[in-house]
Image: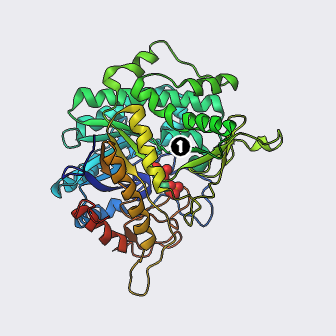
Amino acid sequence: MKKTIDEKFLWGGSSAAFQIEGGWDADGREPSVLDTKIDIPKNITDFKVASDHYHHWKEDIKWMSEAGFKSYRFSISWSRVWSFKNNAPNKPGIKFYNDVIDELIKYKIEPIITMYHFDLPDHLQQQGGWLSRATIDEFERYAKLLVETFGKKVKYWLTINEQNMMSLVPEALYGKKAIMKETYQSNHHMFLAQAKAIKIVHQLSDSLVGPAPNINSIYPNSNKPEDYLAAINFANIRNWYYLDVPVFGRYNEIVLDLLAKNNSMFDIKEGDMDILSDPLSKPDFIAFNYYTTATVKAWDLSEDDSSNSSVKSDQQSLFGIKNWFQRIDNSNLPKTQFQWEIDPLGFKTTMLELTTKYHLPLLLTENGIAALEQLDENNEINDQYRIDFYTAHLKQMFEAMEMGVDLIGFNPWSAIDLVSSHQGMLKRYGFIFVNRTDDNLKDMKRYPKKSFYWYKEVIKTNGKNI
Ligand code: BG6
């Protein structure tokens, strides 16, 4: 059935605590794994100051309201609200998020909150991180704290941001390569933690909750059957594994086969599958991040080249898994300055695939284009490329909705400029420019870009002029 955009549609923008907040050790906050990361390249900033949202939150929310945002998707920093030193909630951290939420509500902006966006408390990492089952209990306690503390004011929760990217490209996000068995053991623990968190939201509140993986269509490089098989493999490894578990409460066969063939099957303890398939742990919607599609072909590298098999640089460029698939550029698509392919039609196909596989409402929690940007002599940023990028994606979004995709909101990345997950402040995504660079904190002043005014009009008119 055709879906239309109405007043309830959640037009907004997105961010993540470690990339926007700064104040990394303020008011009792303890370090996360991103604060203790040591391999950040020399000329790239760390996350200690970021966009200093911790001290500019009022102003930033005012800008969001000025743009007409109906929603703001952001994450809570676990390390800010819980003190492992004191084994107790960190009151100033809780106050910070209460203030942010209240301010959003004052402007009629719906908070959409991610519980965990890459920033595991370092204390937990030291105890084994996600490889340890104790982290599941810690996450359960944390989720309970969040829902008990903020649950009345927050209607939309997201559990874990991009569990798939944390697993598939840990070297990009954390500077570490992974061992397949350990990755999937950690994944299993994250799934259990997520199932428990979803159940908590359902038991303790009337709010809605969903996972937030990065999902995109996978194209075969040719009509060779071997390439199509590679596409099926990668789609299951990258996408469906991460949704089959929360939505259906069971593991994806193709990925289990990959693990078995690589001697990497993880341990499932008695009772685990009951936790994963508990009806109270089924998500109410699927949040997803979409930046681009991926193209793959059958693996054709020699034994020698394949020692490279798990190397690669970032979220969109995972290289391949020996004998399963090999990533390849798509020559039909233009690229951003940071070499991510631009594929608006892929946005539609991704939504169609998600809808026909899982039949749940969808919520777009990231989409955007990064660019190198500097204020011009009038203190302006003429980011027409961002307007063009979003215009093309929104056209496809409307078409997908016409075809019956139940999309409840569009929250692109990022509401304001923030520090990229691994490429610093150079790589900007925001509707609002933040005046700092990687090596100079300058005055942190905010300047709306051209796209800010364009997006404001889109929201006001519900996209009628797209
Ligand atoms: C997503 C993440 O993978 O992509 C964000 O959820 C990230 O945290 C975004 O910032 C853009 O990626 P990057 O690496 O360009 O910052």
Q: Quadrant of residue 334?
A: bottom right
Q: Is residue 28 visible?
A: no
Which residue in the rendered view is the most extreme toward the bottom? 377
| Residue 338 left/right relative to 379 | right
Q: Secondary structure at mark 1?
A: helix
Q: Which residue is mark 1?
A: 165
- Does 163 sit above or below residue 409? above
Q: Quadrant of the C terminus?
A: bottom left
Q: Quadrant of residue 145?
A: top left
Query: Is disc 1 surrounded by few (<14), some (14 to 19) or many (20+) residues within 10 Å?
Result: many
- Does 13 sit above or below residue 174? below
- Does 193 sit above or below residue 392? above
At 50% from the left edge and 42% from the top edge, which residue is drawn? 122
Q: Is residue 385 visible?
A: yes
Q: Position of residue 287 (x, y in %)?
A: 37, 42
**In this figure, which colouring scheme has been used for the structure?**
rainbow
Q: Position of residue 293 (x, y in %)?
A: 53, 50
Name the kind of residue labelled 1 in the image: Met
At 57% from the left edge and 51% from the top edge, which residue is drawn? 316
Of the pair 252 and 126, the residue shown nearer to us: 252
Q: How many marks?
A: 1
Q: Position of residue 300 (x, y in %)?
A: 77, 41
Question: Does the closest atom of ligand 1 sit within 8 Å of the Cβ of label 1?
Answer: yes
Of the pair 174 and 313, the residue shown nearer to us: 313
At 25% from the left edge and 26% from the top edge, which residue is drawn? 203
Q: Quadrant of residue 116?
A: top left
Q: Quadrant of the N terminus?
A: top left
Of the pair 83 and 235, the residue shown nearer to us: 235
| Residue 133 left/right relative to 106 | right
Which residue in the rendered view is the most extreme toward the front? 223
